Amino acid sequence: MKSITVSQKLIQDFEENGAVCIRGLLTTDEVELLRQGIEFNLKNPSPLAKVCSDADDPGFFIEDFCTWQHNEFYRRFIFESQIGMLAGMLMNSRTARLYHDHLLVKEPNTRQATPWHQDQPYYNIEGKQNCSMWIPADSIARASTLEFVAGSHKGPWLMPRSFRDKQAKWFPEGSLAELPDIDAQRDKFPIIGWEVEPGDVVCFHMLTLHAAAGSEPGKRRRVFSVRFLGDDAVHAPRPWPTSPPFEGLEAELAPGARMEHPMFPVLWTR
């Protein structure tokens, strides 16, 4: 990674909007390492991998989770770059702890969109200091990029639902406010997003509302996401499977405990 300076302005933008884009952060070698990791992942999917597009979709959308321990390319990218430092600075945290990795690949002509949602309600954590990085391995136009409702990370948790059948599988019906129909009234929301190139990194808070359309005709949309936890993150076991699940973790970490576990190594300390 190129030497970077995390300015106070960038930190303030992250705190205010819940999402920022950093241009040209990664070197050509780091982007190539990431592409090698993605292709290895696609050829060797984990048991958590899932197809997110319908059978009649002209493209193909696949996700996978938590494979860094078995993917040398991912591991090198995560541990040898400065992304942990960047996350720690943006979170205003003394430490940056790896939470998990997440592969999102939409092959050319994929129709399936990623609907509006927050990430944190699907997880087994509590705390305000967190950071997700959405890292493209391909050029992505504004129409197909990840977009956000600026400032939504300051608001309430909204009901997480399964993306395709809209079922409430994480919190009981009525326990959280429902997500507004953002696409039906886009002009009423401060929506931000960026056309991105390989080397750019989009960073966002796990409570920031975000969504993405399908891929462009004839173009792949390969993305690697890395999620980080800050000082105030603690374990929050749920009575239902989280996404991703961390099976057996409840027997090793008590509710409210810091996420001190080999699955979640500290990558940076101030």
Image (cartoon, grey):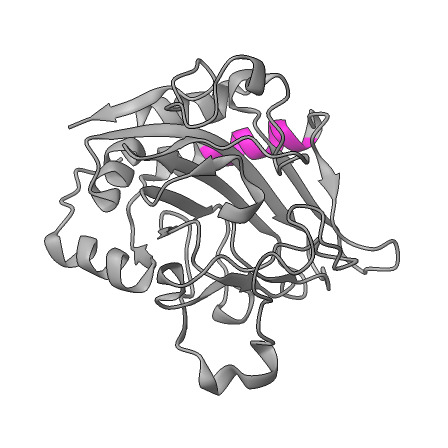
Residue 61, x across and y down, in percent: 71, 50
Q: Relative to residue 23, is residue 230 depicted above or below?
A: above
Residue at left offset 25%, top offset 57%: 15
User: Where are the magenta residues, as a range?
Assistant: 34-42
Residue at left offset 66%, top offset 63%: 113
| Quarter holding residue 59 | bottom right
Residue at left offset 14%, top offset 59%: 9
Outermost residue, right direction? Answer: 56
Is residue 159 within the magenta segment?
A: no
- Say which quadrant the C terminus sits in: top left
Outermost residue, front direction? Answer: 175
- Say which quadrant the N terminus sits in: top left
Residue 77, x across and y down, in percent: 40, 28
Q: Nearer the viewer, residue 63 or 217?
A: 63
Q: Is residue 194 left or right of residue 120?
A: left
Residue at left offset 46%, top offset 85%: 188
Residue 149, x across and y down, in percent: 43, 69
User: Tag count in the figure?
Assistant: 0
Q: Nearer the viewer, residue 120 or 257?
A: 257
Residue 85, x across and y down, in percent: 23, 33
Q: Is residue 78 left or right of residue 269?
A: right
Q: Relative to residue 51, is residue 179 depicted above or below?
A: below
Magenta stretch secondary structure, dominant: helix
Q: Relative to residue 32, is residue 121 depicted above or below?
A: below
Q: Is residue 206 left or right of residue 176?
A: left
| Quarter holding residue 250 | top right
